[in-house]
Image (spheres, rainbow, N blue to C red):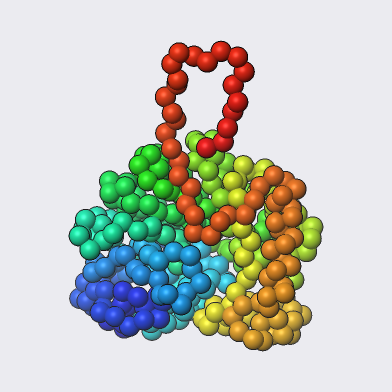
Amino acid sequence: MRWENLTADSEHGRADAALFGADAVTTRTFDTPEFRGITFHEIRARSIINRVPAVSRMSFQWTVNPYRGCSHACVYCFARKTHSYLDLDTGLGFDSQIVVKVNAPELLRRQLASHRWQGEHIAMGTNVDCYQRAEGRYRLMPGIIAALRDRANPFSILTKGTLILRDLDLIRQAAEVTDVGISVSVGFTDQELWRTVEPGTPAPERRLEVVRAFGEHGIGCGVLMAPVIPFLSDRPDQLRATVRAIAASGATSVTPLVLHLRPGAREWFMTWLGQHHPYLVPRYERLYADGSYAPKWYQRRITRQVHELAEEYGIGPTRGGTPRRIRPPEPAAEPPVSGPIQLSLL
């Protein structure tokens, strides 16, 4: 295992100074049902704030990733390629060999306090899920959120994990002093598809309960409808069922994203497809013949259908990269205003 190859920007394909030394790695396994078959590699990272390359399609410039590898085991996960930098395989190794940056909260607090840091927006959950199963044991996110709150540093979190509800109070505190965006990923509501393509995640309806819970506590929560999987979750009735469920959860927005198959993820997904839906393999080879992304015409069709459904159900698309700020309630005006009062949205 080439630990020295794990660099500050290696998740984005750049070679930089090693994030930690091989002598700083502690490998653990836990004989409990939720962690059986998973190996944790605990490391003390040298850097925790990562710059996103300018060539990336992402709408943000900085990320924090306390974990590498993900027990959600989504067969399509684009981050699988990052495991190859450690000589770990991008299939089962990605699902079961989890790198844990145990000093992430203290390191983040130190980097945020540096005079070189300008307080830019930080995105989390964009590489692997920071609320995957390991977070229940290592509890890195409370310290990370507290560090961001104490510096009033804007941030956003994208997750498939229901464990984020544990940190709801901390997120509310942060939202009182800075811009905070919360999004939950729910690509489809088909139960059979979920069990095979996202086997380590909470069920879609449980994720939508997270959206509902945040809304009930005054924190708007959007849904990234991702991925829409060609020929498996893209029928009009399937799209309607998913958008209807998202709307019923009280989501503030829904943003569709069609499946993309980057190297590392592509091989693992196509193996899964051949085992579960072999008749679709030729169709995928044609649809993704030009690269990692589905053709523009297909992406536009899905986006148009979802946006039309979202409008029908009273929700809209997220503006890319825009966090939602949750502000404390305004004090009541004095003296009280007589007559009817016009209510308004924040």
Quadrant holding the N terminus: bottom left
Residue 151 in percent (x, y) is at 28, 49
Looking at the image, which is closer to me, 227 or 95? 227
The image quarter in which residue 54 lies: bottom left
Residue 309 in percent (x, y) is at 74, 53
Q: Is residue 218 left or right of residue 178?
A: right
Q: Residue at x 52, y 37 (%)?
A: 346
Looking at the image, which is closer to me, 59 or 73? 59
The image quarter in which residue 140 lies: bottom left
Task: Indicate whether 98 appears above or below 85.
Answer: above
Residue 93 in percent (x, y) is at 45, 76
Mark yes or no: residue 198 visible.
Answer: yes
Task: Indicate whether 296 appears above or below 291.
Answer: above
Residue 148 in percent (x, y) is at 32, 51
The image quarter in which residue 157 lies: bottom left
Q: Residue at x 59, y 21 (%)?
A: 341
Q: Is residue 100 left or right of residue 343?
A: left
Mark yes or no: residue 133 visible.
Answer: no
Q: Residue at x 57, y 63 (%)?
A: 199
Exactly how many numbered labels are in the figure? 0
Task: Indicate whether 145 appears above or below 233.
Answer: above
